[in-house]
Amino acid sequence: MVMNVVSLAVKILQSGGVVALPTETVYGLAASMRSETAVRKVFQIKGRPLLDPLIVHMLDYTWISEYAHTDDLKVDVKALADAFWPGPLTIVLRKKSIVPAIVTAGLDFVAIRCPAHEIFRKILRAIRVPLAAPSANPFGYLSPTTAQHVRDGLGDRVPLIVDGGPCNVGVESTILDVTADVPRILRPGAIPTSDIAGVLGVTVMDYSPSTGPAAAPGQLKQHYSPNTRLILVESAEDLSSLIGSAPPEDVAFVYLKRPTEQVHERNIFWLSDGGDYRAVARGLFEMLQTLDKSGYNTIYCQKAGQDGLGITINDRLTRAAAKFVP
Ligand code: TXA
Ligand code: MG
């Protein structure tokens, strides 16, 4: 009898194994939160330092009170859950002792989200324990938005990679800390700050790279990087003038939206047809993953405007390019 992939994933997870699963944001490398051995494998497979805590994935809001304190908060977490779950919002809460220290890197706080991908949800419904899962990439490399990206990066180290198609959102969840007096963004992500502030009806402190690393351990300045040199360009005009000065064959140029002028060069790409940031975010890691394997010497990529989802797109691009900044 052929066991379906959900049952197989559940079986592996229940026996202390690790599986790669699709979420709506990026692919995750999942382990049962209850198994320290399994969680340790996740760190090992990714080559991730133990001081970088993992996000814990749950089915819905009713699960969180078992694992985190929700009664002493200044903000309405239920309202956030109603508005954004299942979906790409991660909420940092004070943890209960049932959450193993390895998951939170020894912190008193746990990051929780409810993923929207139907396969992930089926697995949670069947297994009924939270799954700790970072993105399913080697530590520091571009995030994976297809099963093939996971195979390319971690293939032989993961016993099962569940293919749920390309991720619909394409960038990671927004991480929101609600344990202080003023809620604050620890990582810009798929949900813009203004949407969160709108639901809460209070001021939300925006992400700032200067306060980020201390508050969200593991938020490294240099992260999500391709092997190919990546250089960011402020505008479409700047990119066009670079191309105008005779494009070398081994350089790729990436626009946010389809350029209006006729483009003949093979090495010109765009992340969306019309410039919608959701489309740009969806295609961002896929584009960089593909170009990184195409033998280019350098990738020039246009930055987004610093507003809404543009902040998240620029955050990922800036970290990806950081190791190439002299
Ligand atoms: O969309 C996502 O969030 C994806 C999918 C798979 O759910 N996951 C993801 O996980 O991006 P990862 O491990 O690549 O990034 C999680 C980051 C950590 O680097 C850390 O900065 C932050 O979440 N984090 C986790 N637990 C935390 C905690 N207790 N306090 C503060 N930050 C935390
Ligand atoms: Mg990651």
Image: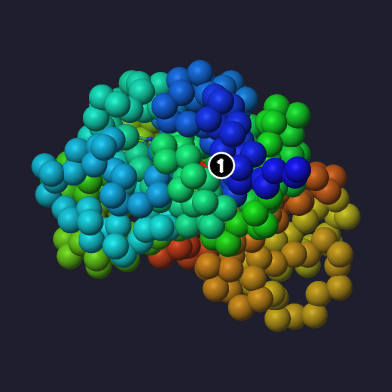
Residue at 68% from the left image edge and 36% from the top image edge: 160
The yes-or-no answer for disc 1 within 8 Å of ligand 1 is yes
> Dividing the image into 4 quarters, which one contains the C terminus?
top right
> Dividing the image into 4 quarters, which one contains the N terminus?
top right
State which quadrant residue 281 falls in: bottom right
Q: Position of residue 106 (x, y in %)?
A: 33, 21
Few, some or many residues within 10 Å of mark 1 (<14, 14–19, 20+): many
Q: Position of residue 230 (x, y in %)?
A: 67, 46
- What residue is pinned by disc 1? 28
Between 278 and 82, the residue placed more toward the observer is 82
Observer able to see residue 122: yes
Between 169 and 319, the residue placed more toward the observer is 169
Does 129 sit above or below residue 239?
A: above
Report whether 181 appears left or right of 25. left
Observer able to see residue 150: no
Report whether 66 appears left or right of 276. left
